[in-house]
Amino acid sequence: MTTVTRNISFNEALPALVSAQFSANGWFDGREAALQQFLALGGIPTVKTEDWKYTNVVSFFKNDLQVTLPEVPEVTAAQLEATGLVLPDTFRLVLVNGVLQPHLSQLPPASQVTISKLSEAGSQPAVELYFNQSPRIGEHHFAQLNAALFNDGLFIEVKAKAQVELPIQIIHLYAAGQARLFNPRHLVVVNEGAALQIIESAAGLGLADKVVINSVMESVVAERAQFSQYQLQTGGNNLRIINQNLVEQKGKSVYNNYTFTLTESEFVRNNLNISLDEERTETHMYGFYIAAGGQLIDNHTSVDHRMPNCESNELYRGVLMDKSTGVFNGKIYVHEDAQKTNAFQQNNNLVISPDATIFTKPQLEIFADDVKCSHGCTIGQVSEDALFYLRARGIGEAEARNLLVKAFAFDITAKVNIPAVRKQVEQLASQYLNA
Amino acid sequence: MLDIKNLHAAVEGNAILKGINLTVKPGEVHAIMGPNGSGKSSLASVLAGRESYEVTEGSVDFLGKDLLDMSPEVRAREGLFLAFQYPVEIPGVSNINFLKTAVNEIRAYHGQPPMQAKAFLDMLKSKQKLMEFDANLMNRSLNEGFSGGEKKRNDVFQMAMLEPKLAIMDETDSGLDIDALRIVSAGVNKLRSKDNAFIIITHYQRLLEYIVPDFVHVLYNGRIVKSGTKELALELEEKGYDWLKEDIRLEEPVQ
């Protein structure tokens, strides 16, 4: 009962906080409305909320959690290098507590991409058009909380037909002296016929206590544009991550999402919502997670097929070790007009400890009659036949198991098109699986 | 090399092997034939150490050691090789990485250092040539998407790489067309020496035209009911197994 009391306290303490500190901050005038929507949804969700049934976050939001505007400490290039996150052959945007640090960044050519702090992007037409407008954003407790409290983030707009040659790596760094809630907020617009790849990494900088990162990124992929988003969730153990990606796709666009959760963070929740607003879009979602110790890794994805002739393809895999918990929920809505939809979904889990748990739920709601949809969930151990085959060739049991688990993972990493990302993910996966 | 005495084994409580006796010496090739369900593949599985089989009686001596006391990997490291009736597909494990791991684990068991990359590749190339094995298959995942024939050839190629002392070939000929059969047999013949031995399990005499055995045994109802030379295989081909079943029924003790 104590946790519930605390939860109510947090919810009750918010209005004063918002009006006192955030309302005067910046161009966004929807904070109060967002706060009201957050409270109307019930505030911080409890396990009684369907989408948070297995994922209890209430204890993260205690009274002493700081939600004031964060200070932004000076970060040096050496500190950035020491995070080990910097990838070669990329453009780079470094954010500290949600605020872009130009001196640590390497921007792509301005002739191709407009990049600015979100706090300074209020007059951009694309911001006016798309900011906080994603379909279903009103359903998300934490996206509403973010809208009420965000301080800053990125605005990225790729000009029509611009093919951004190198991926842009976005490194999110967080520094705080005590428990704190961060609400970074980003908007990415990839205009007609343009192509962009981003790679996101996050880490804490000498965090003394656990912080909650409640991040929201809205993306719009315009007609015939291509956007690939890699999320490398590899940060340290003091981050609790609630991560929302809301994507809108226009006609003939392609969107690829790769979410790799290979982290020491005790808690990661990803919400990926994709809205297919026009015809002939293509969407690929790949996820891979390894949970160990007492970690909880939760992936909620949803795809709204609103128009005909769109294709979505989802493959998530996870390895659950020790006393960890995994949650996968994959919703696919095929709306009435979305004839000739192709929607595929797979979630495979290897549960290699008797104390680990996975909750996996495919959820298809189909209101059109001429569609191809499939889904599958598996929960299992490594194949005994494969294990015997390897052992019969002289490979010891432990090593054979290890090979098979890696094979399970590398099936997904093989989908990665950026060699440096693939290498980093495979190294991390090996490291976690060998531990 | 291999000395099987009164071997009994069961799967989930059902007796499958009911007193096998067989001695294999270095340089010999033994063929084991018999109708479906007679226990041929079970014998191969028991010798390789498949855990679903429970040995209920008897002993197996392999090169002076108790084979039944060893895990499957130790059996392999001691020089036993099973060519599978159904080689397993393992997506995500590359053929080449798998072989390197196997070779080096076997070397480590014998106190040898891991093979240098260059030496390994040289060995790979020479065995590929010897076995007429398609080099393009090496970089693919283990058996993934291979045809039936390619899988069997991959197994025999692995045998060439691991240089076992005793190879048990479990219906390697099943699912092979005549060309693949010729290549697989030629490979096996190239590997034959005075120091190693083969147990060839097969339904058909056809394979034994290519790999000529020193001895032929007929397995029926969990026991070896007849042993002879290669002429026995011809006789079986001609008459089938029914005449043997008749004979055995007469010999079967009244229970």
Image (spheres, rainbow, N blue to C red):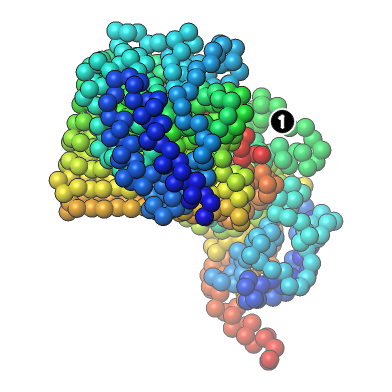
| Quadrant in the rendering for residue B69 | bottom right
Q: Chain of mark 1?
A: B
Which residue is at 68% across, 47% downward?
A: A398
Question: Split into 4 quadrants, where in the image is the C terminus of chain B?
Answer: bottom right
Residue that extends furthest to the left in the rendered view of this protein: A337
Residue wearing tag 1: B115
Which residue is at 46% across, 13% downward?
A: A101
In the visual, does A287 lie left or right of B36?
left
Residue that extends furthest to the bottom in the rendered view of this protein: B254
Query: Foreground: B74 or A301?
Result: A301
In the visual, does A47 lie left or right of A177?
left
Identify whether B39 is placed above or below A237: below
Could you tell me which secondary element the residue under label 1 belongs to? loop
What amino acid does circle 1 point to? Met
Query: Foreground: A137 or A294?
Result: A137
x and y percent of residue A16 in the render? 39, 33
x and y percent of residue B219 in the render? 64, 71
| Quadrant in the rendering for residue A262 | top right
Which residue is at 55% across, 64% downward?
A: B203
Query: Foreground: A214 or B66?
Result: A214
